[in-house]
Image (cartoon, grey):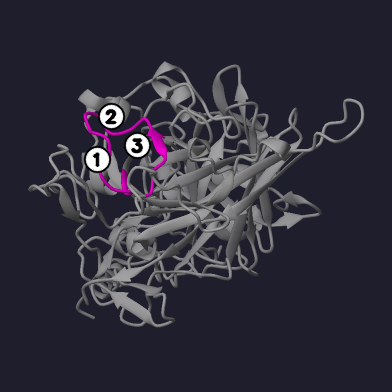
């Protein structure tokens, strides 16, 4: 067996190199969709929805991939496992509501540890990590987001490679198969280390020391069978995450069930983004590698279209996901020695206020119709009337300018357009995604059925006490990350329509997903 075991000397060399890695590479979002890390901004099993998902290995090498599902309030892990994809492999699964419990089901034979397909292909989400002071009920996990992190490539012809490689559609050959990989992580008697599986003794046995190479892509689709709708999107692909089997938290390849590897486990603490003028900006002004991941998602403004046109019973909901937020607002994620909250976030997760904890005040800059009109106050010519937002931040007077505050409290939030809905505190949910983590923007109160809107994440200028004076704390500029102001955010808009002109009882629903558009604002040049 041609198994690769790193010696202490080699490990020492890798560890020494870790501090200088990154000069030639940088974390980046690949616009072509292939990467080492995939971020899927949203899943839901609410409102009759099922979420279908896939990941594709486009390379000629077997890959080990960490799959992690997290709930939408504070990114607490609700399911994780290791996925071992053979060359050119595709793995698929679905998420659905099983009598109140979010559950994953797969009919795909690709090897996982534990082997989910071999256990009937069904795995419920688990509540064991809901220990942050919020709800401990698994219903909290009915919406959220998920990620896939490449842990490395397998050397061709090794035991692991043979066990994971499909032959006539089934992994393995001879006595080797998916059970081999399960046994590699198994201590059969919990007593004799000599009987442990080979990955318990050496987590990178059979791994190429060169580390992850990327080439993964994936996507998801939110399907509602009864309504006849499907909303599909591509995962965000991150490259330059790591160039070694050794990450910032040790080996990238970790035992199933471990919180590692995470988005803080890369070994390249440098990030590169494209600015709005077409130039690039690179920064390394941080000590944690997760900051490089946050950096490539930084935006000061996010914008998209909306429609609630009555003639086609239209609806619009915006998904706003902060994929790294828990590293900045929650102690165990940030690290026990890190004071909270960590810039650019301004509020930490507080168990005493878990229902609306870690809220970030952002600004609904302006909302327009399709003819660039704003509604003007007839008593104050030239003054636009802002839309009604609910739930609004508590104890705020009516706004004195068109910029109105909006609190996004969760790692995954939904903004629903249209008439005021039942508040989430009273069990209200949105019509399309069934989200309970939502805010409502009543655009129709303005007389607008369709148009576009813009959110500003850079700070605010808001008369909190209504005295007409900008007092201390009423003008706020968010602290930049790597020279970029705003927050690390991603997401999309979903729109649905109904055709009411068909004869009989024909179901005619339509829908689509539209990626958010955004800007980046460079306010401080970081050391290069």
Mark 1 touches mark 2? (CB < 8 Å): yes
The front one of 360 and 78 is: 360
Residue in view at x 46 percent, y 51 percent:
374
Which residue appears farthest toward the right when viewing the image? 503
Mark 2 touches mark 3? (CB < 8 Å): yes
- 398 in relation to 274, above or below: above
Label 3: few (<14), some or many (≥20) within 10 Å?
many
In the rendered image, the quadrant that contains the C terminus is bottom left
User: Which residue does the numbered mark 2 point to in the structure image?
Assistant: 132
User: Which residue does the numbered mark 3 point to in the structure image?
Assistant: 74
The tag earlier along the polypeptide, 1 or 2, is 2
Mark 1 touches mark 3? (CB < 8 Å): yes
Q: Position of residue 466 (x, y in %)?
A: 17, 38
Q: Does any portion of residue 371 appear in the rendered image? A: yes
Residue at mark 2 to residue at mark 3: CA–CA distance: 8 Å
Would residue 339 be found to the left or right of residue 253 on screen?
Answer: left
In the rendered image, the quadrant that contains the N terminus is bottom right
Q: Residue 41 magenta-drawn?
A: no
| The quadrant where residue 132 appears | top left
Tell me the chief SS of the magenta region.
loop
Residue in view at x 27 percent, y 40 percent:
399
The tag earlier along the polypeptide, 1 or 3, is 3
| The quadrant where residue 298 appears | bottom left
Question: At numbered mark 1, what does the secondary structure look like: helix, strand or loop?
Answer: loop
The front one of 187 and 17 is: 17
The front one of 64 and 457 is: 457
- Residue 330 image label: 1
Q: Position of residue 379 (x, y in %)?
A: 34, 42
Residue stretch in magenta? 384-404
Q: Does any portion of residue 53 appear in the rendered image? A: no
The tag earlier along the polypeptide, 2 or 3, is 3
């Amino acid at each position: 067996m041609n198994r690769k075991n790193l010696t202490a000397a080699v490990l020492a060399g890798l560890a020494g190199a870790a501090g200088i890695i990154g000069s030639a590479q940088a974390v980046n979002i690949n616009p072509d969709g292939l990467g080492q890390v995939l971020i899927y901004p949203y899943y839901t099993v609410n409102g009759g929805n099922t979420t279908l998902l896939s990941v594709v290995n486009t390379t000629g090498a077997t890959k080990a991939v960490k799959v992690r599902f997290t709930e939408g309030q504070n990114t607490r892990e609700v399911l994780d496992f290791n996925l071992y994809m053979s060359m050119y492999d595709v793995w698929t699964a679905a998420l659905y509501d099983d009598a109140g419990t979010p559950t994953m089901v797969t009919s795909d034979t690709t090897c996982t540890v534990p082997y989910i397909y071999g256990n009937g292909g069904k795995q419920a989400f688990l509540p064991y990590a809901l220990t942050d002071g919020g709800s401990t009920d698994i219903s909290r996990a009915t919406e959220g987001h998920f990620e896939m992190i490449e842990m490395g490539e397998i050397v061709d012809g090794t035991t692991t490679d043979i066990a994971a490689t499909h032959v006539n559609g089934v992994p393995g050959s001879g006595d080797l198969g998916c059970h081999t990989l399960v046994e590699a992580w198994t201590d059969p008697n919990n007593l004799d280390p000599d009987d442990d599986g080979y990955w318990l003794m050496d987590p990178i046995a059979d791994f190429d020391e060169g580390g992850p190479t990327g080439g993964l892509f994936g996507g998801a689709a939110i399907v509602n069978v009864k309504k006849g709708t499907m909303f599909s999107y591509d995962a965000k692909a991150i490259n330059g995450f790591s160039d070694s089997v050794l990450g910032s938290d040790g080996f990238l390849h970790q035992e199933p069930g471990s919180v590692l590897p995470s988005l803080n486990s890369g070994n390249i603490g440098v990030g590169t983004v494209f600015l709005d003028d077409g130039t690039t900006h690179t920064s390394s002004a941080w000590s944690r590698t997760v900051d490089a991941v946050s950096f490539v998602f930084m935006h000061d403004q996010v914008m998209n279209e909306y429609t609630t046109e009555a003639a086609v019973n239209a609806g619009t909901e915006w998904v706003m996901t902060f994929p790294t937020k828990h590293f900045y607002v929650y102690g165990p994620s940030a690290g026990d020695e890190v004071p909270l909250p960590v810039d650019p976030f301004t509020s930490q997760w507080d168990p005493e206020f878990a229902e609306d904890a870690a809220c970030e005040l952002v600004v609904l800059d302006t909302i327009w119709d399709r003819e660039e009109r704003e509604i003007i106050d007839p008593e104050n010519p030239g003054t636009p009337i802002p839309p009604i937002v609910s739930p609004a931040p508590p104890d705020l007077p009516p706004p004195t300018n068109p910029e109105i505050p909006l609190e996004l409290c969760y790692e995954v939030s939904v903004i629903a357009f249209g008439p005021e809905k039942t508040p989430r505190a009273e069990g209200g949910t949105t019509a399309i995604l069934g989200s309970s983590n939502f805010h409502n923007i009543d655009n129709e109160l303005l007389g607008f059925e369709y148009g576009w809107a813009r959110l500003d994440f850079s700070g605010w200028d808001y008369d909190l006490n209504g005295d007409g004076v900008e007092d201390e704390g009423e003008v706020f500029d968010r602290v930049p990350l790597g020279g970029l102001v705003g927050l690390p955010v991603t997401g999309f808009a979903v729109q649905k329509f109904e055709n009411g002109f068909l004869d009989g009882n024909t179901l005619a629903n339509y829908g689509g997903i539209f990626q958010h558009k955004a800007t980046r604002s460079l306010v401080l040049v970081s050391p290069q």
